Image (spheres, helix red, strand yellow):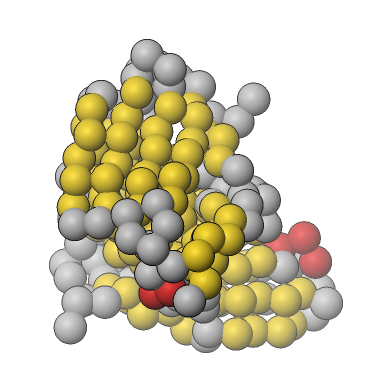
Amino acid sequence: EAQVTQNPRYLITVTGKKLTVTCSQNMNHEYMSWYRQDPGLGLRQIYYSMNVEVTDKGDVPEGYKVSRKEKRNFPLILESPSPNQTSLYFCASSLSNAAKNIQYFGAGTRLSVL
Amino acid sequence: QKEVEQDPGPLSVPEGAIVSLNCTYSNSAFQYFMWYRQYSRKGPELLMYTYSSGNKEDGRFTAQVDKSSKYISLFIRDSQPSDSATYLCAILNTGGFKTIFGAGTRLFVKA
């Protein structure tokens, strides 16, 4: 089954404690992206990757890091989480980011930073 | 001004009603328009995708784009309780490298 898998689904942590949210896709997609979703603000792109070792900032990259060492994996790293990073996070992938290419989303990771 | 504006609702309708969901956008250069549906505790899934002005129909769903007004709409005919979800409009920016999402409209269809 084609899917994007995020882990963990729920995470509660404290300010300053480094964490990683993993994302893996089994569709051999080139393009992967991380979004955060906040009430009234919709989905905002954090980082995206056009292919292995190619990453770039989205609209809200501050406080986040990513890496793309393998095509299937695109982890999101919070080096020093802060309460304003409490949010619902989604990973997405598509064959490319041209028109007609559907973005497939993971089920989401709900993060609370205390 | 946000690039894409969408009324967050919530919108509550009785089963069988025609639902109209709308977004406006600011950049006339945008060309690709999408609607995603997001059920509670799930990620968004692509519902419909259109290019340029006009209508596109898929079963009970019709997507409409009016480029002159910079207005996009999603109509749901004969709405069902299973249509209860958040609907997000999305636009692919010029060059096709970034998808810009609206805030999403939460829809409740009552049986």
User: Going 29% across and 41% down the picture, which residue do you hit?
Assistant: B63
Residue B99 position by quadrant: top left
**Residue in the foreground of this view, choosing between A69 and A26:** A26
> How many numbered marks, from 0 up?
0
- Left or right? Give the position of B68 relative to B55: right
Please give left or right for residue A57 compared with residue A50 in the image. Answer: right
Q: Residue at x 37, y 14 (%)?
A: B68
Q: Looking at this view, is A82 or B83 the one in front?
A: B83
Name the one closer to the observer, A54 or B4.
B4
> Relative to B12, does residue B21 appear above or below in the rendering?
above
Looking at the image, residue B32 lies above or below residue B59: above
The quarter of the displayed image where residue A72 is located: bottom left
- Answer above or below: position of A4 versus A34: below
Residue A69 locus on image (x, y percent):
32, 66
Point out residue B106 in the picture as x, y percentages from the top left corner.
56, 59
The residue depicted at 50 percent of the width and 65 percent of the height is B14
Image quarter of residue B54 = top left
Q: Position of residue B4 (x, y in %)?
A: 52, 34
**Which image quarter is the N terminus of chain B in?**
top right
